[in-house]
């Protein structure tokens, strides 16, 4: 049975499973999800023309900032599932209250990131740079500024979470477009026209992220719900976030380990890895737009007490995710000799990018299905299973393989082989879980 209304604040009776309904939620979410990697892609294109050292520094700094984005996505994903269940149970006020509490968490975590980050940024960048002092120094300077954007990043992602839960996908899209447009204008101006170089890109991002955070806070204020902290709701969100944090920390350990291993190959290899990895992140989050639709629709269906519809959504979004992954693989594969040149004029960087390109392309169809099923289980609140599966894939497969690649000096192919195995292990576990029924538990809150 289809959703009766998609307007913000309208009660939902059950989740629709037709492709148009998925697209109506997924396409605006695509813009939102693509925002942070687009920030980094713009930075990569602008900074890449400053030189190899600056590009390598951005690779390390961007990897560390991905940790902040991961914390925000934990807030967003946990909030989406809880808000969607409240929305499905026709309790829209409590759905928005979930967003208020997520925003309080965002502010607290953002301030903590700034304080801790300023203390540890030097040792972290030196460790990741593998002895290249020029790259380490440039990355440290960039990060000291970029970390100031943490509260804005987290507030925006928390805002996205509750808005997705109440099936308002358009408002976050406009907020993100405003922030990204500002960053896109400021970045080249500050880097080149103002002569700030690498640090100019960090300043542009911080300004844009602050504007985005303010916009999402204003959306909560307009809803006229209580804005005080609610410890009972915060405890519930923290319980969900705990498992998502462990899961996300496993991802970050994998990607930071990959950057550290590649940094010990050469600056050119690290630059190529940055280009390929940021394109992977961009494509992954584009594919995750389908997962966002799954989170909202599955959560609403289970909140309305209809597990059968939730299982139907799972099958539909899985197929849609796979098709989208194949389509992206074709596009990225066709751009093998064009896209690397857009990010760096260095022939060594471009040659190394061609080495990693087949791995990037081959992982995209797998990613389409994996991310879609991730969304299904997050929407259902089945986060403990996701945590355990990710730990097995990371600790049992990826990390041993990545350091084996380092020991055997396998270079970029060894690193990306480890990433591919990481995806395959997750795919097998998710398909087996989705085919069962244990994840589809009805109720306003799991």
Image (spheres, rainbow, N blue to C red):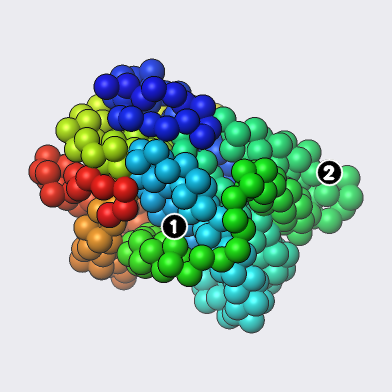
> Image point 55% across, 75% down: which residue?
124
> Image point 76% across, 52% down: which residue?
207
Residue under label 1? 74
Work out how far the residue at label 2 is from the one at label 1, CA to CA, in angstroms: 33 Å
The mark that comes first in sequence, 2 or 1, is 1
Q: Position of residue 82 (x, y in %)?
A: 39, 50
Q: Nearer the viewer, mark 2 or mark 1?
A: 1
Q: Quadrant of the N terminus?
A: top left
Q: Position of residue 106 (x, y in %)?
A: 57, 62
Residue under label 2? 189
Residue situated furthest right in the rendering: 194
> Image point 59% across, 50% down: which residue?
225
User: Which residue occupies the foreground of this view, 139 or 220?
Assistant: 220
Q: Is residue 1 above or below residue 256?
A: above
Residue 371 visible in the picture: no
Left or right: where 342 falls relative to 380: right
Residue 382 visible in the picture: yes
User: Which residue occupies the foreground of this view, 91 or 399?
Assistant: 91
Left or right: where 193 falls relative to 215: right
Q: Label 2: few (<14), some or many (≥20) within 10 Å?
A: some
């Amino acid at each position: 049975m289809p959703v009766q209304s998609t307007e913000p604040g309208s009660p939902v009776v059950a989740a629709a499973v037709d492709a148009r309904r998925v697209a109506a939620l997924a396409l605006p979410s695509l813009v939102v999800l693509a925002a942070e990697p687009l920030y980094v892609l713009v930075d990569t294109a602008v900074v890449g023309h400053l030189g190899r050292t600056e590009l390598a520094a951005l690779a390390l700094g961007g990897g560390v900032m991905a940790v902040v984005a991961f914390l925000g996505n934990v807030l967003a994903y946990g909030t989406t599932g809880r808000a969607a269940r409240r929305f499905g149970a026709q309790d829209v006020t409590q759905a928005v209250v979930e967003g208020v509490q997520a925003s309080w968490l965002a502010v607290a975590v953002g301030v903590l990131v700034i304080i801790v980050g300023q203390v540890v940024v030097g040792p972290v960048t030196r460790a990741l740079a593998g002895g290249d002092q020029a790259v380490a120094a440039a990355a440290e300077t960039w990060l000291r500024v970029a970390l100031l954007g943490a509260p804005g990043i987290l507030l925006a992602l928390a805002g996205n979470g509750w808005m997705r839960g109440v099936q308002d996908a358009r408002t976050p899209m406009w907020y993100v477009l405003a922030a990204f447009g500002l960053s896109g204008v400021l970045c080249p101006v500050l880097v080149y026209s103002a002569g700030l170089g690498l640090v100019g890109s960090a300043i542009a991002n911080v300004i844009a992220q602050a504007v985005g955070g303010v916009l999402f806070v204003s959306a909560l204020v307009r809803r006229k719900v209580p804005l005080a902290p609610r410890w009972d709701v915060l405890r519930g969100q923290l319980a969900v976030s705990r498992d998502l944090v462990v899961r996300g920390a496993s991802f970050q350990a994998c990607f930071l380990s990959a950057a550290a291993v590649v940094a010990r190959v050469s600056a050119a290899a690290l630059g190529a890895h940055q280009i390929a990895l940021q394109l992977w992140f961009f494509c992954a989050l584009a594919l995750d737009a389908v997962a966002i639709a799954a989170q909202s629709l599955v959560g609403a269906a289970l909140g309305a007490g209809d597990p059968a519809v939730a299982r139907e959504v799972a099958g539909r979004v899985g197929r849609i995710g796979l098709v989208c992954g194949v389509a992206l693989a074709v596009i990225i594969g066709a751009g093998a000799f064009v896209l690397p040149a857009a990010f760096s004029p260095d022939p060594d960087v471009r040659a190394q990018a061609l080495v990693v390109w087949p791995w990037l392309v081959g992982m995209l169809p797998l990613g389409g299905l994996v991310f879609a099923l991730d969304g299904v289980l997050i929407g259902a609140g089945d986060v403990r299973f996701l945590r355990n599966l990710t730990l097995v894939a990371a600790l049992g497969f990826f990390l041993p393989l990545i350091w084996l690649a380092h020991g055997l000096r396998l270079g970029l192919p060894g690193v990306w082989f480890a990433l591919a195995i990481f995806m395959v292990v997750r795919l097998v576990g998710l398909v087996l879980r989705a085919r069962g029924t244990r994840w589809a538990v009805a109720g306003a809150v799991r």
